[in-house]
Image (cartoon, rainbow, N blue to C red):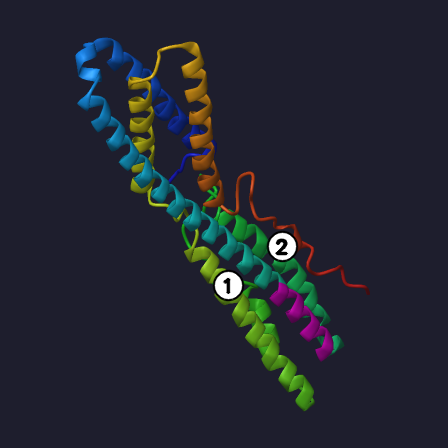
């Protein structure tokens, strides 16, 4: 089973490379003669750094937009799933008292479904490999199909309940197929490499003092924070900004006998 590093660990590694570029620049500065760090060389390096900084900002913007889109999409799907579950329960209630058993099963299946969704979309060893095809359980679907409608209203309610259960299944499938990161790892590696090169070139021509190192440390933390934000948004079902499963679990109140 494939394992992935946590956003925090990945961000710490990125910080080590980015801030490490500062010391690489200082090391190169002390190794090269002054004539290689002045005049045309300085101008060329600054122009190249400006180009790389522009490219890095574009890639950073694309990654943030991609991660935020994934977070918003899956958050919306969970909200729609919750709404469909509540709608299904209301339809079954309108059908009549003969659906009390089905509604009880629905409450149990919602908890199971929430567990599966958050497990499938989490990272690490808990992530499952195969899709659970029955969003609310095959038995529950069969029970709705076996309902004997006695009136036209009940017939319409049965059809609507089946359609709603089908919609729930479609959303479950979308959430499963979207499991995993949407950010290409090569993009992230290239971005970290560019940021490292930028900090190397800055320290290459900067004064080698504690003040400069502290300032570049703060800048490195800021750049790493952006990467951490991207990685957190890219994992909507885990981490600090995870989508809460509580609304789905609490969507259906306990049935009163």
Q: Circle 1 — which element?
A: helix
Nearer the viewer's eye, disc 1 or disc 2?
Answer: 1
Range drawn in magenta:
83-95
Binning the other alpha carbons within 10 Å of mark 2 as few (below 14), some (14 to 19) or many (20 upward) gives some
Q: Residue at x 20, y 20 (%)?
A: 39
Q: Circle 2 — which element?
A: helix
121 relative position to 29: left or right: right
Tell me the residue that label 2 is attached to.
Answer: 111
Q: Position of residue 183 (x, y in %)?
A: 37, 46
Tell me the residue that label 1 is attached to.
Answer: 171
Does the stretch in magenta take in 94?
A: yes
Cα–Cα gap, marks 1 and 2: 16 Å
Specify the label residue 88 is tagged with: none
Q: Nearer the viewer, residue 157 or 27?
A: 27
253 relative position to 183: left or right: right
Q: Position of residue 131 (x, y in %)?
A: 44, 57
95 relative position to 53: left or right: right
Does the stretch in magenta take in 126?
A: no
Q: Position of residue 184 (x, y in %)?
A: 33, 45
């Amino acid at each position: 089973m494939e394992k992935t590093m946590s956003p925090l660990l990945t961000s710490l590694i990125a910080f080590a490379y980015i801030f490490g570029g500062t010391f690489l620049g200082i090391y190169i500065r002390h190794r090269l003669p002054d004539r290689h760090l002045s005049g045309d060389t300085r101008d060329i390096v600054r122009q190249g750094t400006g180009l790389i900084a522009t490219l890095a900002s574009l890639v950073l913007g694309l990654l943030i937009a991609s991660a935020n889109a994934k977070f918003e999409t899956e958050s919306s799907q969970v909200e729609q799933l919750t709404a469909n579950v509540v709608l299904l329960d209301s339809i079954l209630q309108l059908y009549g008292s003969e659906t009390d058993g089905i509604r009880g099963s629905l409450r149990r299946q919602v908890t199971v479904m929430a567990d599966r969704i958050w497990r499938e979309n989490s990272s690490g060893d808990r992530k499952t490999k195969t899709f659970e095809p029955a969003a609310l359980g095959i038995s529950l679907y069969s029970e709705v199909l076996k309902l004997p409608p006695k009136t036209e209203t009940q017939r319409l309610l049965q059809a609507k309940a089946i359609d709603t259960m089908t919609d729930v299944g479609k959303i479950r499938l979308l959430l499963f197929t979207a499991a995993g990161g949407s950010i290409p790892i090569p993009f992230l590696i290239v971005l970290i490499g560019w940021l490292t090169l930028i900090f190397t070139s800055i320290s290459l021509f900067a004064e080698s003092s504690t003040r400069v190192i502290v300032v570049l440390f703060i800048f490195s933390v800021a750049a790493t924070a952006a990467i951490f934000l991207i990685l957190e948004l890219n994992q909507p079902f885990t981490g600090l900004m995870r989508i809460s499963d509580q609304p789905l679990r609490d969507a259906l109140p306990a049935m009163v006998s």
